[in-house]
Image (cartoon, grey):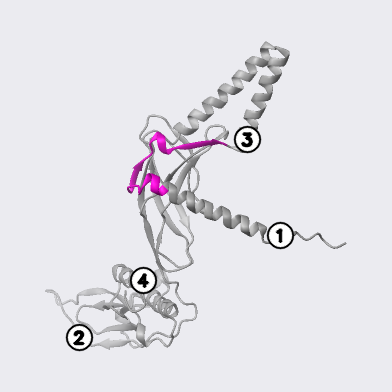
Amino acid sequence: MSSIQWPFPDLRAQISSVKARAGDRVQSWARKRQGSDPVTTRLRPGRVYILPTGVGMIFGFMAFAMLLGSMNYNNNMSFVLTFVLVGIGFVSMHQCQRNLVGLELTFAGADPVFAGQAIRFRIAVTNESKSARYGLRLHATGTSSDTHDLAPGESKVFILPVPTTRRGRIALDRFGVRTLFPFELFRSWAWLHMDISGLVFPAPADDAPQPPPTTVAHGHRQHDARGEEDFAGLRKYHEGDSPHHVAWKAYARSGQLLSKQFAGADTSSQWFDYAAIESNDVEERLSVLTRWIVDADRTLEDYGLRVPGAEFKPAHGEIHRRNCLETLALFQGGQS
């Protein structure tokens, strides 16, 4: 027996498209109505919305049915039970909205990630009231944070992970906070429209070509007042380095051979040049450069970067790595 074919195979996709467009229009309307929020925003009563959940609607229908039954049979105990249930519903509605009013939300930053990883927006939620807040959760399109409780005067950082697919700045224009406390009969929520964003580096290439060869600059050793050489840091071990300059303690910890670098001694470095990569694809070139930078930084090798519009002299360290990767993340064709 052949299966029955749905006469409108694209209907589900069309419904999803209509819902998405409606959601975008509602979001645009809400942003125009509320405007942009500062990075620290306190929730006022007028910004907190509330609606019954599915369970709440069933609860209300049952309470209404019991009221009709009580009126029909004129049973005092039924009236008492009905009014108790109605009272629970009103208390639940009041407490659900009150659970969000007065909360203070502050953008606490977002660490850069590579394309394809989830960027973690940090939102600090502070409860300055004298009553505890329960069951709080942040949410955005397609993602949400863990659920947390806040004691009186307590502040917690909520992590809102947002997936990424491309390099550049990713904006979190809209996110919300919601709660189902106390009995999940009502859902209370508030939307925030902060102008916040995070930085996404290009994804390191998996099959990048070999980086340019290392060049060695000859220097003159410097000595301190006691005649000892000034230690300047660690670098990748090169064949021919003196065994006396090998950082054996670092090797015991990491299993990687590193040589001690002294001020005025011979230094090795690499230049990573955008124009020297044999590819016509901009994103592929940026991914190769990212791979070279990540590998060189891991081995403490000095490296420089040349891209159209920017140049960084050979160095190493977290600040140098961040500057180079940020330039690649914001690179725009012939401009950075």
Q: Amino acid at mark 4?
A: Ala
69 is within the stretch colored magenta: no
Of badges 1 and 4, the one in the foreground is: 1
- Residue at point 38% right, 73% down? 298
In percent of width and height, residue 74 lies at 70, 12
What's the CA distance linking mark 1 and mark 2? 76 Å
Q: State the residue position of label 3.
A: 55
Q: Secondary structure at mark 1?
A: loop
In percent of width and height, residue 22 lies at 53, 52
Marks 2/4 in contact by CB < 8 Å: the verdict is: no
Residue 250 is tagged as: 4
Q: Secondary structure at mark 3?
A: helix
Q: State the residue position of label 1.
A: 8
Question: Depth check: 45 or 243 in front?
Answer: 45
Of badges 1 and 2, the one in the foreground is: 1
- Residue at point 47% right, 61% down? 118
Of badges 2 and 3, the one in the foreground is: 3
Of badges 2 and 4, the one in the foreground is: 2
Of badges 3 and 4, the one in the foreground is: 3
Marks 1/4 in contact by CB < 8 Å: the verdict is: no
Q: Amino acid at mark 1?
A: Phe
46 is within the stretch colored magenta: yes
Q: State the residue position of label 2.
A: 219
Q: Which residues are magenta?
A: 31-52
- Position of the C terminus by quadrant: bottom left
